[in-house]
Amino acid sequence: MVARNASPFSYDTANQHLHLHYTSPAPEWSHALPVGNGRLGAMVYGRPGTELLQLNEDSVWYGGPQDRTPRDAAKYLPLLRQLIRQGKHDEAEELVRRAFFSTPHSMRHYEPLGKVELEFGHGSGSSAENVEGYQRWLDLEKATTSVVYHYEKSKGMAVNVRRDVISSYPDQTILVRVAASEKIQFVVRLNRTSDVEWETNEYLDSIESADNRIVLHATPGGRNSNRLCMVLGVTVDDREDGGSVEAIGNCLVVTSAACTIAIGAQTTYRHTEPETIATSNVTSALAHSWAELLERHVADVQSLFGRVSLRVWPDDSATPTPERLAASPPDAGLAALYHNYGRYLLIACSRPCRYGKPLPANLQGIWNPSFAPPWGSKYTININLQMNYWPAANANLPECFFEPVVDLLERMAARGATTAKTMYGCGGWCAHHNTDIWADTDPQDRWMPSTLWPLGGVWVCIDAVEMLKTHYDRDMHVRLAPVLRGAVSFLLDFLIPSEDGKYFVTNPSLSPENTFIDASSGAKGILCEGSTMDTTIVRWAFELYLWSDEKLHPNSPGMLRKVVISALKRLQPLEISPDSGLLQEWGLRDYQEFEPGHRHVSHLLGLYPGRYISRRKTSKLCEAAAKVLQRRAAHGGGHTGWSRAWLINLHARLGEAEECNRHVELLLSKSTMPNLLDDHPPFQIDGNFGGCAGILECLVQAEEGIMETKQGGMEKGVVIELLPACPSNWKRGEVKGVCVLGGWSVSFGWEDGVVSDVLVFRTNEGLYGAVIVFPGGKQANVHGPGEHVVSTGAKHRQHRKVVGFNTD
């Protein structure tokens, strides 16, 4: 077989370290490659015979808003608190089932948008059996997935084929380019069906084709659902040379050697007439050449993706991705690819919306093939939504965070005021451990270890305010201030004195999804007073409120500031068990966990993402945290993808480089699918984002400290540590543009643990000077905004060390 005109139809290996690449089509969803523009996404299979694009749009959800607030909860709250305090666990849980669970118990769930099939008639369905030269790849830098191959047309002669797929933010469409070395004919179909075996239902209202368009309308089930409209259009470059598009039935028949397919989709969540907007998107896109569409798509993506870069050697990027995953151990460069893939995914599934309100990344980002997805593919806010955005600050992607998350928070605060008042008799607002497209704040499910936990919304609010400390935006700060004030007001009303009156505690409380054994009775329990996670969240929220209020109103402290300062003094400290040396999970009670290898490590929130447990400041708490991780590991902890990702970050904060490496390798070998998406199992995207953040955490960490001024005095500063937990097998590397506290960004290279070419930069909005801490402990102070080149020579010995803290 002779392949003609091979050059445009070959795999371009430039910047291959930023490629996922394969030598066969995707046999199933876990092998398909994702594209997205923050709102509109596709999983692309790369099949020669019948190409499949499984589509999603972030506002396609089953059902509209619901009123689920338990109306009798506040009346029974005093009794519930009494039962919890008395250790009457069974009675407390039965009361919760009766008075505190919502009806209906579930929020709304996310659904697929639909699918596009391109029937080429060559190849063999989903395999590459009858084609040659097959290559499939995802270029992270260009946010483009491509496939090339050739097939035999007649003996000794071949036709080359190339397809490229992008999801364009500038054009708000998914775009497919089909090119061949001569005219080929294929059929385009648009539908909305399930991928479940033997299920043949079509989930749509109508589908019509005419001229070069297909239009599909659908209404997901449930009262007041958003209606959706998909519009697909095709244009051929070679119309004057016989290229054509013909509508037959509800499909399009395309004859062309070069054509572009545009897919637009909108819902009534953002537009009263979604067909009008989707049609406009498609028409506008098809008015441009493929070269123009691709150029502005790539420029848009690179304006975000190009802000940060990471390479690590040894790097085996020439090897196909599945083989790299199967290697034991994997090459170090695969960890860098995993990090870069995480940044790509965040850009692809969470961005400001061009039209109407944005939505944050859900449990599956935006990529969900199921009409009954795991956990509803909602926003789980007892770890998962928060983990989705762990890379956003350091990876310099604040816009991927701020608009989607702050909009959700504002809507949660509005609905959560009713939840707080009706369930707990409190002011302010609260949300439990899940929310949905409608910002539902009531309890989700009827599962005791997770359902009755009203601090989920506070934690999301904390993350939003923390983002300001790295990427300060006054407009966002002004928007967040009333949301934070409402969260703090709820906490102040919700706290009650401990049994001895010494501390303020939350009640009811729990440690998300975990269960303890009450040694006094031998009974299992879930509900408690003042879990360690709760106390950490309360302290964090109070301290952020003081920071926020002082920054916005430095000369006019309000009464709430005084109340918060007073309440802070009465919060219980982090407790270390005198018997086990472990950090106590259930606050003042030294309960033993029922499941020692539990996936959640909620009591270590103060180690990561918080900074209340620190090698520089609280060495005894670090030892207790390390013992917790050792115990979890000894009993099989980290068995889910997101949990393993959390462990990477926790060990990085402890400076345990080889433990970080062990968990990175386990994340890749045990919890990663062939398309590098996280395998919980099943797929959850939080593990990708947690792992992405953890890999950077091994290389750069920052915390607030005290440093020497140019005049010899002392002032607040940011301590920036380089290679705090870099695994020994990451022999050589370079990282650029990592953002940390105080508006600083850091770039440097390293080889065998020796750092070189250090460049730091501070924005004008940055708050403090910085102390750069090198491996081995040498330090250099930098002051003021702008760019600073930091020498790695012997002169570091002349710099004074950071004044340390020790609050043990």
Image: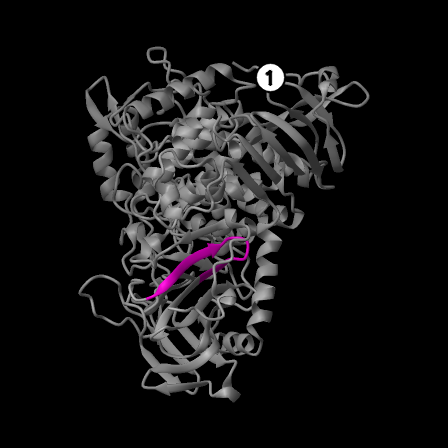
Residue stretch in magenta? 131-146
Residue 177: image location, x then y, percent: 48, 71
* Residue drawn at the location 34% of the way across and 38% of the way down: 669
Q: Is residue 145 magenta?
A: yes
371, above or below 728, in the image: below
Q: Residue furthest front?
A: 156
Closer-to-camera residue (680/159): 159
Residue underneath mark 1: 805
Residue 422: image location, x then y, percent: 37, 47
* Residue drawn at the location 31% of the way across and 86% of the way down: 249
Specify the principal SS of the magenta part: strand
Closer-to-camera residue (438/730): 730
Identify which amino acid the numbered label 1 is placed on.
Phe
Closer-to-camera residue (579/722): 722
666, above or below 428, in the image: above
Horizontal side, residue 762 vs residue 159: left or right: right
* Residue drawn at the location 44% of the way across and 84% of the way down: 212
Query: Does any portion of residue 622 appear in the rendered image?
Result: yes
686, above or below 598, in the image: below
* Quadrant the N terminus occupies: bottom left
Q: Residue furthest right?
A: 711
Horizontal side, residue 767 vs residue 31: left or right: right
